[in-house]
C-alpha cells in the first residue's frame, strides 16, 4: 500500500483546496475505494463501445477525450492533466456503451473508483455528493460556454479564450491537439499564432 500514499494525498489535497474538505474517516474511505493505475502513452482508459466503469482522477500525465466521425477524423472534446477528472459521465452514470475515447497523451497515473463505490459514497457520506455535484456543475458551465463560443466567437477569439481558461493545457499540448479542440485545422492555428506574434501585447 505504500505506493498509494502519494497519489491518495494528491486526491485529498484536491478536495481540501477547492471543495468541502474531507474528514479523516472520509479520507480513509478514499484509500479503501480508489485504485491506483499507471497508463502508458497512447493507451486507452476507455474506447468507443465500452461501458465506462470508473471515474478517473489524474495524478500525473495528460489525457484527451475525443470522438471519431464517420470519415475517421478525431474531434477533441476535453483534456485533463494533474488534479483534473477524465470520465465519460454519460456512459458512467447510464452504464451504456461510450461514444468517445479516453487516451493518454503522456505516461500517466490515475486514481479510479468504480461506479457502485462512488454511488455508495454519495449515499453514506453526503460531502462526497456535494463535492461531485459542484464538480459536475462546473463542467456543465464550461461545456455551455464552449458551445456558445462555437456559435458566436471567431477562431481567433476561441483560441484566446482557450489560452485564458486553460493555460495549463496550452503549455502541454501540441498544436494538432489544440486545433482539433477548437474545430480548426493545425495550419489555421499556426496562422493565428503567427499573427498574434506580430501584434502588440499578443503571444
Image (cartoon, helix red, strand yellow):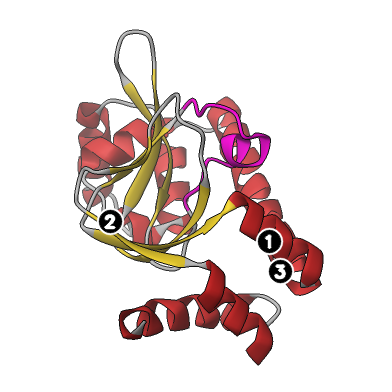
**Camera-side residue of 187 and 13:** 13
SS for dot 3:
helix
- Residue with the most extreme bottom position: 24
SS for dot 2:
loop
Mark seen at residue 166: none
Which mark is nearer the camera, 2 or 1? 1
Please state the extent of the stretch shown in magenta in the rendering: 86-99
User: Is there CB contact under 8 Å for labels 1 and 3?
Assistant: yes
SS for dot 1:
helix
Above or below, 50 against 64 in this view is above
Q: Quadrant of the C terminus?
A: bottom left
181 to the left or right of 15: left
Give neighbour class at mark 2: few <14, some 14-19, many 20+ (Cα, 10 Å): few
Q: Residue at x 51, y 50 (%)?
A: 54
119 to the left or right of 181: right
Q: CA distance from mark 2 to mark 3?
A: 40 Å
Residue that numbered label 3 is attached to: 128
Above or below, 96 against 60 in this view is above
Nearest to N terminus: mark 2 or mark 3: 3
**Camera-side residue of 22 and 14:** 22
Q: Residue at x 61, y 50 (%)?
A: 115
Above or below, 10 against 119 in this view is below
**Camera-side residue of 131 and 145:** 131
Q: CA distance from mark 2 to mark 1?
A: 36 Å
The picture quadrant where one finds residue 155 is: top left
Residue 165 belongs to magenta span: no
Residue that numbered label 2 is attached to: 203
How many marks on residues?
A: 3
Amino acid at each position: 500500500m505504500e505506493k498509494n500514499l502519494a497519489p491518495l494525498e494528491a486526491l485529498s489535497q484536491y478536495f481540501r483546496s477547492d471543495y468541502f474538505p474531507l474528514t479523516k474517516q472520509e479520507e480513509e474511505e478514499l484509500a479503501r475505494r480508489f485504485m491506483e493505475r499507471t497508463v502508458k502513452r497512447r493507451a486507452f482508459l476507455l474506447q468507443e463501445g465500452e461501458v465506462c466503469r470508473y471515474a478517473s482522477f489524474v495524478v500525473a500525465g495528460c489525457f484527451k477525450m475525443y470522438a471519431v466521425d464517420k470519415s475517421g477524423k478525431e474531434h477533441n472534446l476535453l483534456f485533463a492533466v494533474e488534479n483534473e477528472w477524465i470520465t465519460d459521465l454519460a456512459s458512467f452514470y447510464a452504464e451504456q456503451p461510450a461514444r468517445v475515447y479516453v487516451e493518454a497523451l503522456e505516461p500517466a497515473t490515475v486514481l479510479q473508483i468504480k461506479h457502485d463505490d462512488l454511488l455508495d459514497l454519495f449515499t453514506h457520506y453526503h460531502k462526497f455528493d456535494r463535492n461531485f455535484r459542484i464538480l459536475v456543475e462546473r463542467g456543465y458551465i464550461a461545456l455551455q460556454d464552449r458551445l456558445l463560443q462555437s456559435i458566436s466567437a471567431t477562431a481567433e477569439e476561441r483560441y484566446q479564450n482557450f489560452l485564458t481558461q486553460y493555460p495549463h493545457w496550452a503549455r502541454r499540448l501540441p498544436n494538432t491537439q489544440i486545433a482539433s479542440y477548437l474545430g480548426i485545422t493545425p495550419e489555421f492555428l499556426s496562422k493565428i499564432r503567427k499573427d498574434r506574434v506580430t501584434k502588440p501585447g499578443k503571444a
